[in-house]
Image (cartoon, rainbow, N blue to C red):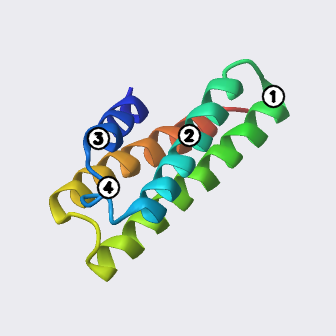
Amino acid sequence: CTLEQIDELLQAASLGDLGGQKTAQRLQRAHADAAVTLRVAARYSGRRLIRRLRRAERAIARFVRVAHRADARGVLDPTLSRHLLALASTVVQQVAAARLTLP
């Protein structure tokens, strides 16, 4: 659900708000990787699930890095940046909690 909110923000924002075409593509690619990995992870259990969740964490971390760098350079809209990073931190917490509940 939080990934869907990130997707809606990315789709609604203009290229200028996202820091240009290159940054927008990086954000969208990292988001898509995380979303697909989490969708696929739902099919697995045990070690495969743990592996998929780690992969999703790396994709989310990449999304956060891109957003932080764009924000630091001043190319990403500050309000949009705050919303994206808040939602991404929620996703990170949810994935970490899912990993902790596994045996």
Quarter of the picture containing the C terminus is: top right
**Callout 4: helix, strand or loop?**
loop
Viewer can see residue 101? no
Amino acid type shown at disc 2: Ala
- Please tell me whether mark 1 or mark 4 is closer to you in this view: 4
Q: Tell me residue 65's x, y (percent).
A: 48, 67
Q: Is residue 44 left or right of residue 6?
A: right
Amino acid found under the numbered disc labelled 3: Leu
Question: Of circles 2 and 4, which is in front?
Answer: 4
Q: Residues within 10 Å of mark 2 (few under 14, many from 20)?
A: some
Q: Which mark is residue 15?
A: 4
The quarter of the picture where residue 87 lies is top left
- Disc sitting over residue 9 in the figure: 3
List the residue tagged with mark 2. Answer: 32
**Image height of 20 relative to 52, above or below:** below
Task: Pick whichever of labels 3 and 2 is earlier in the sequence.
Answer: 3
Q: Secondary structure at mark 2?
A: helix
Q: Tags 3 and 1 in contact by the CB under 8 Å rule?
A: no
For label 1, the residue is 46
Residue depicted at x 73% and y 38%: 52
User: What crowding class fits label 3: few (fewer than 14 Cα within 10 Å), some (14-19), or many (20 or more)?
Assistant: some
Mark closer to the observer (1, 2): 2
